[in-house]
Each structure stands twice: as structure tokens, then as C-alpha cells.
Image: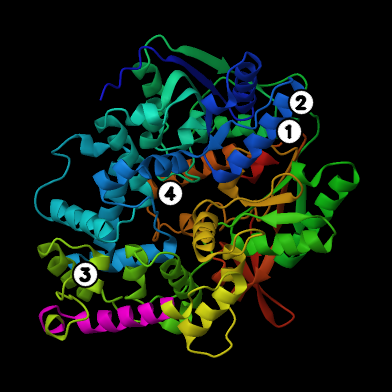
Amino acid sequence: MNTDTSNIKATRIVSGVSCGKTQELIGRACSLLSNGEKAEDVLVLCATPQACEAFTLRLNAAAEEAGANADGVTVTTPRALALNVLGDAEAVRWSGREPRLLTAYEELFLLEDMKVSGLRPKRLREMLKFFYRSWTELADDDPDWLLPGEESNVHTLLKDNLAFTRSIAEPEAGNLAVNYLRTHAGAAAAHSFAHVLVDDYQRISKASQLLASLVAAETLTIAGDRAACVQVYDSYPYAAGLDEFMDAHEGAQDIELSACHACAAGAAATSKLLADPAMQSIAFHAAEDVAAGQTAVLESPLPEDEFGAVARFAAEAVADGKNPADIVVATPNGVWSRNMVKALLAAKVPAQALNDRQPVRGDIRDNERCVPARVLTALDLVADPENALAWRCWCGYGDWLANSSAMANLRKHAGERGMGLVEALRGTQGDAVAANASDADRVVGAKRVADAHEAGLALIESAAGLEGSALLDKLAELVTSQEGAAAPGIVSTLCLGERDNSAAAMAKRFRSRLLAPRIDAASAVQVVPYDQVAGLSPKVLIISGFVNGFIPCREYFDSAEMPLDKQEKEHAKDAHRVYAMAGKASEQLAISRFTTTSLETAGVMKLHIGRIRLQDGKRMCVIEPSDFTEQLA
């Protein structure tokens, strides 16, 4: 395929945080629309689903003001674009995969299937990380990128397991999409947009960056900040791509913005952070029209007091005329997010929390401890009885090794007969791999898998024709063998919608909510993890839980757990994270912290303990402010 970019008008916009990169992209999109370009010909790629929500709101408002209509503009993530490409019928035939990403609980089965390699878990995890990063950086362009022997064999096993379930690992999606577009004539044209704009270019992977180039037909505009390279959604963000972009697009226009439009406190904080030796020096100065004021510091004696203090601060901002949507509370973890939302709602301030990680958890080896995952897998089967990934998971629940050895034998046996997983389970023309008693003797562990398959078929038949809550409750009843059982709350939250609650619609909905989480950015305070402030433009930013143990992490303070060289890397990573947050507030920056907590809480939350003292007969820990407090306050 011809990947010549000489006919593309390329532009790079670089600057520090809050220097107007996103606004510049919005202005360019509005200019295109005002000059007669069709909205359907414009693609905007953002680093996270939540950033897409924020960008869409700002774009629609700006377009309306300019007398244009942006309704048809596609604003999405590179991951979603990659899956759209891989959904082509030809792409499915080429890859042997469905455009179906593994969820967190499904990744547990992949990990168990990889353990049959014989590698120790720690070694296996490190090797998987190497493969994943290499995929995102397109290392497989070199046919000799793997060492022969163990490395090559484990990589083959990984690819075989993914192919057997016809599924895709997240770091693999961009790689597969790029290689499909490169090698199939007409594929890039079928997915092209005349004008492509990419925000936070440094926060997406190299494969995602190349994917953006491949689908751009006339213009390609990217915006980024080297110092804000933080992993937020794509695995292994690629800051070097900002410079490689200029090498790949000869004659590209280069625009540098240097006026920071954050509030005075945010601009001062980011300037101090940029002076850190771990940061790259970039052109940076406060704009003349920034809001004055110092960083507000909210100090509370206990964590529960902190939640109330933040809620009162936000309520006061709303009382002063701020739209709740203009307020963002950044949190260190899910516990803080949930408590913040409770406190805000109690203070009559609308709030929504963005999950810090996928909420469906549990031990897949114990059926009673993974009921939500089992119900979702059952829903996948009802929605599509040909879903190989769902069958693999269904046949592995409740076994100490997730039936990984049995699946490895089944995969080998099916491969010899040219069958996939679903065919192998079902059997064809009497050659039943799992259900036939003679095959059960030849395929080790096939009997356990056959029993699970038979139970799955019975479940699909029992749930036929049901929809919505009735279907979810029925699945919960069948999965738990408890008559009258109701679906777990998290399952209902993930699956149910206002319209179309068929099995297929709910299966698609829960996967989207797990893998592309987003919240309403138009009417409520957004409570988001630290790194998810990326792409948002709050007027008021409150950074909560700003203590040692949350940032930096507890291990950073223990040289036995984290050697000096790793401490330096950890400091550099955290400096970039704080920099990417602190400069986002355009009118008010606040940091919130607590000073003490119980020894038990400190242990559970992995906080760094300053000292321990006895208070009212209870051991209490002094918790120190974050090491980055001086730069922000």
C-alpha cells in the first residue's frame, strides 16, 4: 500500500499545558465547517472517551457561535477508530478476529492460558509487557524483532490464544488496524476523512499516531505537549511521535504556543514543575488575562473530613455562579471518588464519578466470588452463541487453573482438524471434540469443558426471548442456582439503557461502559482519577488526597522496595502527572489533603506513614502532604 504523505497538508501545534492547543483545534474545525466542508469529512481524535465528551461540547458551542453545524463531526478515540477498521468483513477474514477487546476479567483467562508456557508468573508478565509495548510501537515491522527460542515461542502462544478466542488485546488493536490498512488496497480510502485533527498527540500510542496519518486524505493537524506524556487510555503513549511527525511530513507547518491561560496559581505551579530537572524545558509564560489568586489549600484532620471540605468548597463555587460542569475533582483512587460523590450529593451538588478501573472484579477460580463476571459472560452467550471469547471464559470459571490445560489441549486438537473454539465445543459431523466420550479420553480435561459447554447451552435455551431486567435476573438465577436471585447491581448498571434492552444491545452496552467509560460532562461535577483530567478544561480544579502514599506512592519512600534508579523514574513520572493536572484550572486551583488516619486505614490505602501516635487509645498515623505540595501551593 502506498503510504506517501506528500499530498497531505500537515500541521503540528506544540505548547505547554493550557496554552490553547485544544482551542486551536476547535477553531480550525469551525473554520473548515464555515468554509463549506462537510461535517462528515472531519475526524477529531482525543486521548480518552471523556476528553471526547468535553471536546464535543466545546466544539458544538463554538460552531453554533460561528454559525456552523458540527453535528456530523466524528469525535472519537484512536482505539474506537481501530476497532471500526477491524470490523470490516475483509479485516475480520484477514485477522481471524472479531473487533472485540478483552475486558479486565477476560484478561485473567488469557493470563491463565499463557501460564501453560511454563514461565514463572513474574517472568511471563514482564514478557507480555514487552510484547504489548512492541505491538504499539510496530516493532513487528522487522521480521527479526523476536529472539528465537523462548521469546518467539511465547509470542506464538499468545497470538494463538487470542486467535482461538477471536479476540483482541488492547495494545494490539492499533497495530492490527495499521497493518490492515497498509496491506489492503482501498482499505485506507474506505476509512479516510478529508480532515483529521488529533488532540493530546503525546498521550496516544505510536500505532494510534500512524493510524491517524493513514486515514487523513487532505489535512492532518496534531497538537501536543511533550511534558504531559502520561498514560491515560492508550497503552504506552509515545511522546517521540511529536518529533517523528515532522520527519514524516516534509514541509509541515510548525506552530508553537507559549501563553498559558491557566489561572495564576496554575500557571505558577506548572512553571515550578517545569523547572524540575526531570521535566523538559519548554517555552512558557502566563497569559495577560489569567485569573488572579493563589492556590486554595483545604486541610482536614481525617479523610472523612476531607470529603466534606471538598464538597463545601464546590458548593460555595456553585453558589457563586459556577456551573457544576465547570468543576473537576481529581482523586487518587476509586475509594476517594465514591466518597467524594457521596459528599457532593449530600451537599446538593450534582456529581458523577469516572471509574478509575473496570468495576467488575472477583476471583474467576471461585464461582461465588465472580458472580457479576459470570452473569456478563452468560449475557454474551445469549446475545451471540458463536462468541468464542465468551465460551472460553464460561468453560473456565470455577477451576483453580481456569481449565487452562484443558483449553490448551482443546486448541491443539481443534487446530489439527481446522476448527475454531466454538466448532470444537459443538463438534461437526459426529467428530465432537468436547461432547463425544471417546474424544474426552483423547483430550485431557475435555470432560470438564464438555460439562460447562452443556450447561451453557441449557442456559441459552432457558433465557431465550427475555430482555432487560427479566433477562439479567434470569441469568443471575441460572448462574448462582438460586431461585429468585436478582442480578448484581453493577451488572444492571452496566447493561440497562433507556432504549433497546435486548440481549445483543445490553452485551454491546456493558462492554462499551467497561472499555470506554465516560460520564455526563454537561451538568455535573466531574470526579475523575488524577490522570483523567487530561482533555478536560475546568474552571475550578480540586486535587484531592494530595498526600504522600497517593502521590508519590508508598514504595517511593522505601529504598528496599524501590532502588534509587527506580525512585528517579517514579519522581519523573509523578512530576509529569502533577504538571498535566495543575495547569488545567482556568480560574481556581485547590489542593485538598488530610493529616491523620488510623493505622489500619493507612495500611489498607498504602499511605506513607510519617509517625504513629496514640490518640484516645487508638493508634493514629501522621500523613504528610505530597512532596509536590511546595510547587502547587
Is 68 situated above or below 450? above
- Please tell me how crowded label 3 is: few (under 14), some (14-19), or many (20+) other residues with Cα within 10 Å: many
Q: Which residues are magenta?
A: 440-460
- Please tell me how crowded label 1 is: few (under 14), some (14-19), or many (20+) other residues with Cα within 10 Å: many
Q: Name the image quarter holding the N terminus.
A: top left
- The x, y position of residue 473, in whole percent, is 57, 78
SS of the residue at dot 4? helix
Is 146 situated above or below 473? above
Dot 2 corresponds to which residue? 290
Dot 1 corresponds to which residue? 586
Mark 1 and mark 2 in contact? Answer it, CB < 8 Å: yes
Dot 3 corresponds to which residue? 424
Does residue 182 show up magenta in the picture?
no
Q: Closer to the observer: label 3 or label 1? A: 3
Sequence-first tag of 1 and 2: 2
CA separation, marks 4 and 2? 35 Å
Sequence-first tag of 1 and 4: 4
SS of the residue at dot 2? loop
Sequence-first tag of 3 and 2: 2
| Camera-side residue of 453 and 463 | 463
